[in-house]
C-alpha cells in the first residue's frame, strides 16, 4: 500500500467515526427531548431531602420508622405520618418524602413493628392491623414523638400528625391523647368518641372524599361534637373522588389541591 492510499484510508476512517459520533449525539438529543420533564429534572437537580430508616424503643419493643429531612440550615417542625390499613407502603414513604420537600421533618412509624413489620400483602396487613390494641398504637406514637426530641434537625415542640384511612382515624384519636400536639390532619378517617373530644388541644383539619359514604355518614355528628366541645374542626369534602384519593390520584388536580391545603395548614400551625 502506497502513502496516498494509506492517507485516503485514514481519512475515510476519520470521516466514518465522525459520522457515527454525530449520529450518536443526535440519538441522545432526541432521547433527551422525549424524556418526561420530571425525569430530566430528577437527573439534574441536587437532592433536596435526606431519607432513611431508623429504629427506636417503645417500651420493650422496637419500632421501625421511615424519616425524611429537608435540606435547610435551621431545625424544622415535624409531622408524624400514620399509615393506612395497608401498613407501611410506597405511598406512605413518598408522602413522608413530600412533607420533607415541603419543609418538615417527617417520620412514619411502622405501627406493625410489634407484629414483625408490615407484610407485602395488603390483605395480610389488614388482618394484622385488626389485632392492634388502640392503647398500644398510642404508646408507639408517643415513642415516635419522644424519638423526635433526639433529632437535632427537628423542632420537637412543633409537632403535627397526619393519617390516611385507618391512619386518619388514629390521627384524630391521637389528638385526644397528646395534649402537646400542635396540629392534626384527618384524611378520610373516622372520628373518636365524642366524650374524648374535649381533651383535644391541637388544631385540626379534615380532608374527606365525596364518594365515601361509609366515612362521611359519621362526619356531621363528629363536626357537631367538636363544636360542642369548643374545638374548631374545619373540613372539606373534595368532589368527584373516593376514599384513598391521595394514594389512587384518580383526579390529580383534586389531590394536589387538597395537599396544598394540608401544607398551608401545617405551615400556619407549626410556624414553618
Image (cartoon, helix red, strand yellow):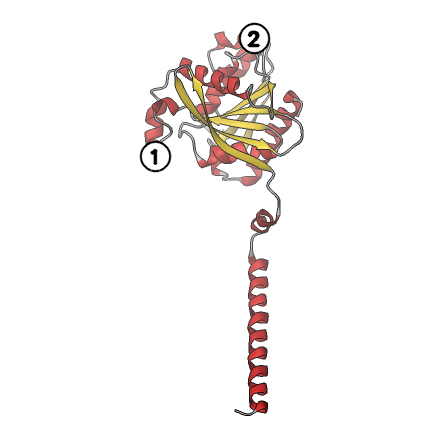
Q: What element carries label 1?
A: loop
Q: Where is residue 127 in the image (x, y as percent from the top left)?
A: 32, 26
Instruction: Give the quadrant of the C terminus.
Output: top right
Q: Position of residue 254 (x, y in %)?
A: 56, 36
Residue 218, can we see it? no
Quarter of the image for residue 121 reads top left
Quick check: 215 left or right of 127?
Answer: right
User: In the picture shown, does residue 137 fall above or below 81?
Assistant: above
Viewer-nearest residue: 138 or 201:
138
Q: Is mark 2 on a helix, strand or loop?
A: loop
**What residue is drawn where x is 44% and y is 28%?**
84
Q: How far apart are marks 1 and 2 (CA)?
A: 40 Å
Residue under pointer 2: 229
Quick check: 157 left or right of 175?
Answer: right
User: In the picture shown, does residue 34 fall above or below 85?
Assistant: below
Residue under pointer 1: 121
- Mark 1 vs mark 2: give the one in front: 1
Mark before the other along the chain sequence, 1 or 2: 1
Residue 75, can we see it? yes
Viewer-nearest residue: 254 or 155:
155
Amino acid at each position: 500500500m502506497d502513502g496516498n492510499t494509506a492517507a485516503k484510508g485514514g481519512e475515510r476512517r476519520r470521516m466514518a467515526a465522525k459520522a457515527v459520533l454525530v449520529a450518536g449525539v443526535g440519538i441522545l438529543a432526541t432521547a433527551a427531548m422525549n424524556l418526561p420533564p420530571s425525569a430530566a429534572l430528577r437527573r439534574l437537580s441536587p437532592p433536596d431531602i435526606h431519607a432513611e430508616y431508623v429504629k427506636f424503643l417503645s417500651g420493650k419493643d422496637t419500632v421501625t420508622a421511615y424519616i425524611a429531612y429537608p435540606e435547610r440550615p435551621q431545625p424544622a417542625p415535624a409531622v408524624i405520618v400514620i399509615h393506612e390499613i395497608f401498613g407501611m407502603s410506597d405511598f406512605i414513604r413518598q408522602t413522608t418524602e413530600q412533607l420533607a420537600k415541603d419543609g418538615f421533618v417527617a417520620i412514619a412509624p411502622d405501627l406493625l413493628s410489634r407484629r414483625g413489620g408490615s407484610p407485602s400483602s395488603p390483605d395480610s396487613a389488614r388482618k394484622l392491623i385488626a389485632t392492634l390494641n388502640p392503647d398500644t398504637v398510642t404508646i408507639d406514637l408517643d415513642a415516635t414523638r419522644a424519638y423526635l426530641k433526639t433529632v437535632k434537625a427537628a423542632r420537637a415542640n412543633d409537632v403535627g400528625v397526619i393519617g390516611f384511612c385507618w391512619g386518619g382515624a388514629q390521627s384524630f384519636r391521637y389528638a385526644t391523647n397528646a395534649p402537646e400536639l400542635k396540629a392534626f390532619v384527618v384524611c378520610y378517617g373516622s372520628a373518636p368518641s365524642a366524650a374524648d373530644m374535649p381533651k383535644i388541644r391541637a388544631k385540626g383539619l379534615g380532608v374527606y372524599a365525596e364518594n365515601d359514604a361509609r366515612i362521611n355518614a359519621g362526619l356531621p355528628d363528629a363536626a357537631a361534637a367538636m363544636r360542642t366541645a369548643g374545638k374548631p374542626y374545619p373540613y372539606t369534602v373534595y368532589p368527584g373522588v373516593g376514599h384513598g384519593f391521595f394514594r389512587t390520584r384518580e383526579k390529580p388536580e383534586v389531590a394536589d389541591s387538597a395537599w396544598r391545603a394540608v401544607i398551608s395548614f401545617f405551615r400556619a400551625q407549626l410556624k414553618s
